[in-house]
Amino acid sequence: MKRIGLKEAGFLLIGLGIIGLLIIYPIQLWSDLLDTWPRWPFISLIIVGISTLTVGILKDYLDSK
C-alpha cells in the first residue's frame, strides 16, 4: 500500500472542506433544518489543507536542492 504525500493530503483536506460547504451551505440558505449547524469545521479543514499543501510543496522544493 502506497503512502500518500503531504501535497495529496492537502488536496484531500481542501476537497473535503469544499464538499462539506457545498452540501451544508445551500441547505442552510433554503431551509431552517440546519440553521444551527456550524460552518467553521469545513472552513478549518480548508485552512489546514492549504497549510499541509504548502508544507508539502516546500518539502519537495527543499528535497530537490
Image (tube, rainbow, N blue to C red):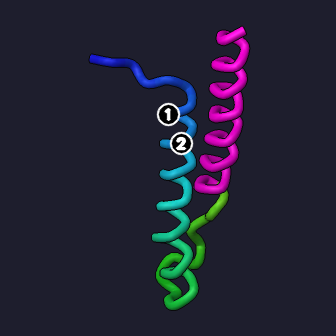
From the viewer's perspective, is residue 64 above or below residue 21?
Answer: above
Q: Residue at x 72, y 9 (%)?
A: 65
Give the farthest residue toward the left.
1
Looking at the rendered structure, the secondary structure element under dot 2 is helix
37 left or right of 48 in image: left
Where is residue 51 shown, x and y percent of the image? Answer: 70, 36
Say whether residue 52 is magenta: yes
Around disc 1, counting alpha carbons within 10 Å, would you say few (fewer than 14), some (14 to 19), or many (20 or more)?
Answer: some
From the viewer's perspective, is residue 13 above or below residue 61?
Answer: below
Where is residue 33 shown, x and y percent of the image? Answer: 47, 82
Say whether residue 57 is magenta: yes
Give the farthest residue toward the bottom.
30
Q: Residue at x 50, y 52 (%)?
A: 15
Dominant secondary structure (helix, strand or loop) of the stretch shown in magenta: helix
Q: Which mark is residue 8?
A: 1
Between 15 and 45, which is closer to the camera in this rendering? 15
Q: Residue at x 55, y 66 (%)?
A: 21
> Is there CB contact under 8 Å for labels 1 and 2?
yes
**Highlighted range, magenta:** 41-65
What residue is disc 2 on? 11
Amino acid type, callout 2: Phe
Where is residue 20 shown, x and y percent of the image? Answer: 49, 61
